[in-house]
Amino acid sequence: MTEAAFHLICGSTGAGKSTYSQALALELGGLHFAIDRWMVTLFWQDSPQPIQFDWTMTRIDRCEAIIFETAKQAVSIGAPAILDLGFTKAAHRQKFAQLAAEANIPVVLHVLDVPVETRWARVEGRNAKRGETYAMEVDRSMFDFVETMWELPDAAEMTALNGRLVGS
């Protein structure tokens, strides 16, 4: 699919979302929006220690508002928007699907469902190598916290959002 659309990249920590998103952006000639890069660049150096959930979520919401507006502009000129925003919860995916619907923008949900052991091993490797997809250190407590939020899309959501289960 090369049509201009919002491509929601969904998966838990270590599923391969950043790697997949970057490749998809190249394949489709689209723009890649990665929330981790935005957060690290704009806010991480000012973050309270230890990290506070409310502080972080407020800033993620701000980033997502600007990402949405910019992605909407991209689609309006024919460029697909690859949204690498985590989308671990159904409500988050639904929020962006609704925003897209209101803007008359098609949505494609790309789901990376990878076993937890594989994902944790990837995170450990990413932490050690600090390569191209590294944005920040993810320790086991952060990884486990996100695991409590992960909601794999069900069949109805996959149908509603033109879902694709993709390899990683």
Image (cartoon, rainbow, N blue to C red):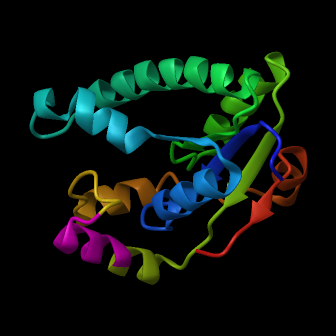
Q: Residue 6 in the image: x percent, y percent?
A: 71, 37
Span of residues in magenta: 122-131
Left or right: where does residue 71 sit relative to residue 122?
right
Per the picture, the main secondary structure of the magenta-coloured stretch is helix
Q: Residue 30 in the image: x percent, y percent?
A: 63, 43
Q: Quadrant of residue 97?
A: top right
- Could you tell me which residue is drawn at 31 percent across and 34 percent down? 39
- Could you tell me which residue is drawn at 90 percent across and 52 percent down? 159
- Could you tell me which residue is drawn at 43 percent across and 67 percent down? 14
Asked whether residue 125 is drawn in magenta, I would say: yes
Asked whether residue 78 is drawn in magenta, I would say: no
- Name the residue furthest left: 49
165 lies above or below 10: below
- Could you tell me which residue is drawn at 12 percent across and 40 percent down? 50
Q: Quadrant of residue 21?
A: bottom right
22 lies above or below 97: below
Left or right: where does residue 5 sit relative to residue 83?
right
Given residues 64 and 90, the one toward you in this image is 64
Left or right: where does residue 106 sit relative to residue 138?
right
143 lies above or below 94: below
Q: The C terminus lies in which quarter of the figure?
A: bottom right
